[in-house]
Image (spheres, coloured by chain):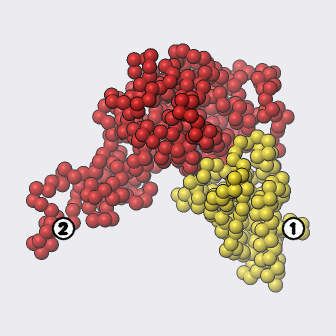
Chain colours: A yellow, B red
Amino acid sequence: MTSKNAGSALLAKDDYRAVNALLSAYCRCLDTDKLEAWPDFFVADGLYKVLSRENVELGLPAPLVYYYSRGMMQDRVTAIRDALTYEPVYTRHLTSGLHVEPDNAAPDAAAFVARSDFAIYQTTEEGVTRLFSVGEYQDRIVRDGDTLRFAERTVVMDSFGVQNLIAIPL
Amino acid sequence: MSRVVDRLWPSQDFSQTPYWAFRDDELYRAEGERLFRGPHWNYLCVEAEIPNAGDYVVGYVGETQVVINRLENGDVTAFINSCAHRGAQLVRNLRGNSLSHTCAYHQWCFDLDGSLLGVPQQRGVKGCGGMPKTFDKGAHGLHRLRVTRYKGLVFGTFSDETAPFADYVGPELIAQIDRIFDRPIKLLGYYRQRVDANWKLYLENVKDPYHAGLLHLFHVTFGIYRPTMSGKVLMDKTHGSSVLRTADIDENQAEVDAIYSDSAKYRPDYSLRDPSLFDVKPDYPDRVTNMIMTIFPNLMLGQVANTFQIRHVRPKGRRAFELYWTYFGFADDDDVAIEGKLRQSNFVGPAGYISLEDGEAGRLVQNGVEARPDGDCSTIQMGGLGPIGDQDTLATEVAVRGFWEHYTRSMGIAVPGTGQ
């Protein structure tokens, strides 16, 4: 059984592992400050949204971040590197509770929908760590050549009372 | 007015702010009394949040939590969110609908006017106990605020002396409110930012067009804001409220390059890979790209490109505030216009290209001044010294001086040389 079987409710172990590896690589990319590689986790017309759980529950559409192309993500990286003023911190993403299903809405492509929980810690230059944000990743993942990429990654923040600001992608 | 602090303000034209203004505990407590319970209009909510009878939202006046209600007759009332009995928080959700409010602790029940409707066991149980015969429900209502509404904005005050709203903000600001709220708004969402800084640092920030072209490179590079643009700073007659306005007229690129020739941060070569963020039709024909209004003491409302926001600066102790954003479009916006506003939300809010840096500016100043010696002061001279008045330039900090003028007057802080 593979994920290419249209309509399958079951997921191959290899697919679960592949999705899990994508999620881990994404976190490692951000936590090791390899931001230039971040847009490549998405397909060219990928969607990256950060939403406040408050707005989601109220049915209000305003996003905290709304990028609908890899170009917009690259622009964010350039701005982070060259323009934006923010507190320098190390980040650490912890994720758990990964749930993956085949994306039955896209029967022809190998595609998955995934949900996972995250906690992001920030550590200052003086080595003091604080919990920055917790929430959920809601993903649509597709096979792009021989690699998996996000067609859509929606970050729903429980911590919508944002501690100061969000500079680096979540 | 009795003095809230023994200290004297160091500058009679408000070109210096003493750093104790951002860190003095006694001063912070006095702000609760003199500003937030004083003769000022405090922002409560927008009417669009409470369209139907029984709708309520919880807001803040200073650190005091208040409930704002829509009555069946269409009126809006507000009272402190604290039971008349033993003071428990009365309403426990931030938003909802209810034609009465019942305290969880002893089930005392209040109508939307704040009047006490019912007291369980008022006559006792089995002939024993109960409230005294002298107990008068009419004398035990909730602590109400006076409420006023203007073009869908709702304000409240604890004082009987607060001037009518139109007089309070004055004709210059009213004209700017009318420009934006000329049609019903449509709520698009909320943002919340917790900043480790005194709330007044945010007010200084949004009254200061000088920083906007220097801290916010993104702003400058893409023409939302440049100091070479046609710009104005207006104030009300107290100088406590202000408008900063920029329009993309009367400037040319050579002037922009000259102004930034000594700035390493300005990058004329910087271009976006995906500029569709800017591909949004203007909402008004007047080419105003930025309109930042502040209403004394702690409200900002305005426009950045196609985004429209109310930012309520909610103090949370002397060195923290929540910036509570209400992000809106207009009821007659079509899907394309709404999509444009959602795209441009990338400019504003806690993650926005422009706004994220203002939270950081507050944090940097608080960190910087927290342990400065007591006599140290900031320098606020951009735009000149002397009398405070409107200016047709963006290279100015005059509205920051105006804020401190009205702040010290409202707080009863002595300013030598001014008779205050």
Q: Secondary structure at mark 1?
A: strand
Mark 2 sits on what residue? B121
Q: Residue furthest right?
A: A146
The picture places residue A112, in percent across and down from the top left corner, at 75, 71
User: In the rendered structure, the residue with mark 2 lies on which chain?
Assistant: B
Task: Kindly identify the residue that appears in the image at 15 percent across and 72 percent down.
Answer: B125
Task: Kindly identify the residue that appears in the image at 73 percent across and 42 percent down.
Answer: A84
> Badge 1: few (under 14), some or many (20 or more) residues near its Cα, within 10 Å?
few
Task: Kindly identify the residue that appears in the image at 30 percent across and 45 percent down.
Answer: B144
Please determine whether, in this image, residue B164 is positioned above or below residue A22. Answer: above
Question: Which image quadrant: the N terminus of chain A?
Answer: bottom right
Image quadrant in which you'd find residue B382: top right
The picture places residue B343, in percent across and down from the top left corner, at 68, 46
Image quadrant in which you'd find residue B27: top left
Specify the amino acid type for callout 1.
Answer: Thr
Q: Is residue B361 visible?
A: yes
Task: Kindly identify the residue that appears in the image at 70 percent across and 67 percent down.
Answer: A94
> Badge 2: few (under 14), some or many (20 or more) residues near its Cα, within 10 Å?
few
Q: Is residue B170 visible?
A: no
Mark 1 sits on what residue? A147
